[in-house]
Every structure is written in C-alpha cells, then in structure tokens.
C-alpha cells in the first residue's frame, strides 16, 4: 500500500527512530512501512495519523498497492 509517511516525517525533520519512538515501534517497522514491505496494523495506522494530525486516508492509499518493481527499487 502506498503511503506518504516518509514525506510527512521528512517535513518535520524527524528520523525514522524519532517517529518510531513517538508511536512505540521499532525504526525497522517505520522503514518497512515507508518502503511498502509492511502494512501497519489498524492501531498503528491510527497512532501515525494522530502524530501527524492527519487522517489515515491522508497518509495511506489502500487503492494503490505498491507493485513488486517499486519494492525492489526501494530496497
């Protein structure tokens, strides 16, 4: 699933580790979500939305799955 997590995080000048600490997950989890290797659980998606004062739909686009070629390019 495509998402705007990296863009939103960069806009606040947060590292992956900083964002991870704010939502209670590992830096690796944030990386996996940003690269489309992992879709967050619903509670984590809500936590991310709260941190960015956004809706889940503003962060995640369930209608646009990340294709395998994009995943490989982002690896």
Image (cartoon, rainbow, N blue to C red):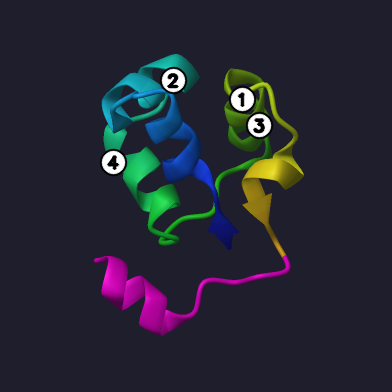
Q: Quadrant of the C terminus?
A: bottom left
- Cβ atoms at labels 1 and 3 below 8 Å apart: yes
> What segment carries the magenta color?
63-75
Label 4 secondary element: helix
The reply, left or right, for residue 62 in relation to residue 66 is right
Q: Residue furthest bottom?
A: 69
Task: State the residue at coordinates (33%, 46%).
Answer: 31
Disc 1 to disc 2, C-alpha distance: 9 Å
In the rendered image, residue 64 lying in the magenta stretch gets the answer: yes
Which residue is tagged 3?
Answer: 43
Which residue is tagged 4?
Answer: 28
Q: Position of residue 51 (x, y in %)?
A: 58, 20
- Cβ atoms at labels 1 and 2 below 8 Å apart: yes
Q: Position of residue 74 (x, y in %)?
A: 29, 66
First along the sequence among labels 1 and 4: 4
In the rendered image, residue 48 lying in the magenta stretch gets the answer: no
First along the sequence among labels 2 and 3: 2
First along the sequence among labels 1 and 2: 2
Disc 2 to disc 3, C-alpha distance: 11 Å
Which residue is tagged 1?
Answer: 47
Report which quarter residue 13 is drawn in.
top left
- Cβ atoms at labels 4 and 2 below 8 Å apart: no
Q: Residue furthest left?
A: 75
First along the sequence among labels 3 and 4: 4
Which class describes the residues within 10 Å of circle 1: few (<14), some (14-19), or many (20+)? some
Q: Which one is nearer the viewer's eye here, 8 or 19? A: 8
Disc 1 to disc 4, C-alpha distance: 17 Å
Label 3 secondary element: helix
Which residue is tagged 2?
Answer: 24
Q: Which one is nearer the viewer's eye here, 16 or 41? A: 16
Which numbered disc, 1 or 3, marks the residue closer to the eye? 1
Label ID, residue 29: none
């Amino acid at each position: 699933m495509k998402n705007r997590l990296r863009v939103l995080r960069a806009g606040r000048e947060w590292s992956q580790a900083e964002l991870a600490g704010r939502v209670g997950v590992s830096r690796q989890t944030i990386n996996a979500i940003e690269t489309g290797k992992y879709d967050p659980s619903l509670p984590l998606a809500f936590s991310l939305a709260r941190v960015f004062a956004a809706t889940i739909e503003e962060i995640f686009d369930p209608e646009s799955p990340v294709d395998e070629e994009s995943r490989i390019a982002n690896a």
